[in-house]
């Protein structure tokens, strides 16, 4: 697609955008004067769908009208409520319904999954992560190692090559080839939170499995952003949050994937609670534990319905549109963003996210030489909401559901002006 650095071009793209109507289904934050923010932080917290209030109000009304009988009599009965989310969530991450469940939050789910899939021995116990993994992932694997009597030093880091920002998957293959007999688990961020790099999950699974290592994926920055095709990738497990690209609200429940090949393995060690017990006999109360098949077998407690209602509001929208259409717009929108950044023509600014659309989602990580957080502050003062990451990176995510081409044009135009002002000073 041939882009143009003009407001008229951006506005014409918005007129031709078949998904532009979705923007009106979201609350766009405004400044004190009533002007819309240019919101580019769907990678941290997605905007609120206008339908969310209605979905939550439905459950509040049913709670008021039915009390405990809402478990059976509510419009959306609470007893099986999590099942209303499964099919749509499975489509988003490319999984079978039996492989997916919505429950808990991201790091909690990673720990529950590692109870089952991190089974170290005296000789095979190390864990591979990216060198710049999200801190919570690092803390989780370090604490798992310590819990099992090993050391934090038993974390193996997959690092970018010297002078580079991105990971090279050939280097992961070398690590596993040389040290695989000592590696029990690979826990990799499918889309790196800092650079926005989308990694080849299928190849990661093949590399790990070649040395009998378990492969897990953190999809916090992938779910609702890229199409990970989890089932076909062959990874053993994955977990993600829903408050970023899935627009479910701050701190909302996460999602969990366990590959179908593990679905009937009742010998996998796991923590137990009444909600992963066979639902047919769950309320008999005095039955021996009988774990459910599939991802549901990792649940512990009955779920918070109000959080799930917010998730349902968003997932219903995703089901209406489909990930294929969202990805098509995302690639165009992010491509335009990249084009405009490059048009600034400054040696002080560089995009560290891969240029290949198949190796990234909608986030672009913009590195600005000699910048500090004051640049981010100036953007905020201009009603541009981005995300600053030390030491010198602005993360921006034009999300296809609610960002427009005009948003992107106006953001880059303001960034260019701010950078020019800084030089003059």
Image (cartoon, helix red, strand yellow):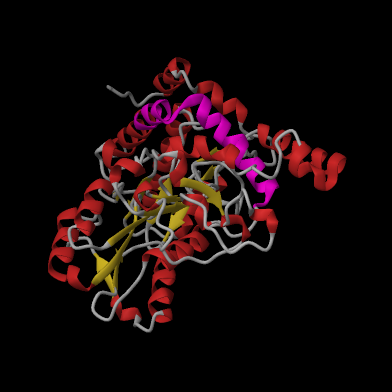
| Residue at position x 70%, y 46% in the image | 306
| Residue at position x 46%, y 59% in the image | 373
Q: Quadrant of the N terminus?
A: top left
Instruction: Please give left or right for residue 352 compared with residue 276 in the image.
Output: left
Instruction: Please give left or right for residue 24 compared with residue 132 in the image.
Output: right
Reply yes or no: does residue 399 show up in magenta.
Answer: no
Front in this rendered view, residue 274 or 77: 274
Front in this rendered view, residue 295 or 216: 295
Q: Position of residue 396 (x, y in %)?
A: 43, 45
Residue 397: quadrant of the picture: top left
Tell me where the magenta segment starts and ends, as one range.
303-331
| Residue at position x 49%, y 32% in the image | 403
Q: Position of residue 159 (x, y in %)?
A: 23, 64
Q: Position of residue 303 (x, y in %)?
A: 65, 52
Query: On screen, 132 above or below 182?
Result: above
Main SS category, magenta section: helix
The reply to whether residue 388 is in sight is yes
Front in this rendered view, residue 246 or 67: 67
| Residue at position x 80%, y 39% in the image | 62
> Residue at the right extreme?
65
Residue 131: quadrant of the picture: bottom left
Q: Position of residue 237 (x, y in %)?
A: 38, 54
């Amino acid at each position: 697609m041939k882009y143009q650095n003009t407001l008229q071009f951006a506005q014409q793209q918005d007129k031709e955008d078949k998904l532009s109507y979705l923007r009106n289904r979201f609350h766009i934050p405004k400044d004190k004067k009533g002007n819309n923010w240019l919101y580019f932080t769907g990678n941290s917290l997605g905007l609120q769908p206008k339908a969310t209030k209605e979905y939550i109000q439905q459950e509040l009304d049913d709670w008021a009208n039915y009390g405990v009988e809402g478990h059976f009599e509510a419009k959306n009965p609470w007893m099986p409520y999590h099942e209303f989310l499964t099919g749509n969530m499975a489509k988003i991450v490319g999984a079978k319904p039996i492989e997916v469940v919505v429950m808990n939050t991201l790091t909690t789910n990673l720990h529950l999954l590692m109870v089952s899939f991190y089974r170290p021995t005296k000789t095979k116990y190390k864990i591979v992560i990216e060198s710049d993994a999200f801190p919570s992932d690092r803390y989780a694997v370090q604490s798992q190692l310590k819990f099992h009597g090993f050391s934090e030093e038993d974390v193996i880091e997959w690092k970018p090559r010297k002078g580079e920002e991105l990971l090279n998957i050939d280097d992961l293959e070398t690590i596993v080839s040389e040290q695989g007999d000592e590696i029990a688990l690979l826990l990799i961020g499918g889309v790196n939170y800092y650079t926005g790099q989308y990694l080849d999950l299928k190849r990661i699974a093949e590399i790990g499995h070649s040395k009998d290592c378990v492969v897990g994926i953190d999809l916090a920055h992938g779910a609702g952003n890229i199409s990970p095709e989890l089932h076909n990738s062959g990874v053993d497990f994955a977990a993600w949050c829903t408050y970023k690209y899935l627009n479910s609200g701050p701190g909302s429940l996460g999602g969990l994937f366990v590959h179908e090949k593990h679905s009937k393995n009742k010998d996998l060690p796991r923590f137990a609670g009444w909600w992963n017990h066979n639902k047919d006999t769950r309320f008999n109360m005095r039955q021996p534990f009988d774990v459910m098949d599939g991802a549901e077998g990792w649940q512990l407690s009955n779920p918070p319905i109000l959080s799930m209602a917010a998730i349902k509001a968003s997932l219903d929208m995703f089901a209406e549109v489909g990930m294929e259409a969202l990805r098509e717009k995302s690639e165009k929108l992010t491509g335009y963003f990249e084009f405009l950044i490059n048009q600034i023509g400054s040696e002080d600014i560089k995009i560290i996210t891969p240029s290949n659309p198949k190796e990234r989602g909608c986030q672009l990580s913009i590195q600005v030489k000699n910048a500090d957080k004051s640049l981010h502050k100036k953007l905020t003062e201009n009603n541009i909401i981005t995300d600053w990451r030390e030491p010198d990176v602005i993360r921006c995510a034009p999300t296809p559901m609610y960002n427009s081409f005009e948003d992107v044009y106006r953001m880059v135009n303001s960034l260019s002006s701010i950078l020019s002002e800084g030089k003059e000073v």
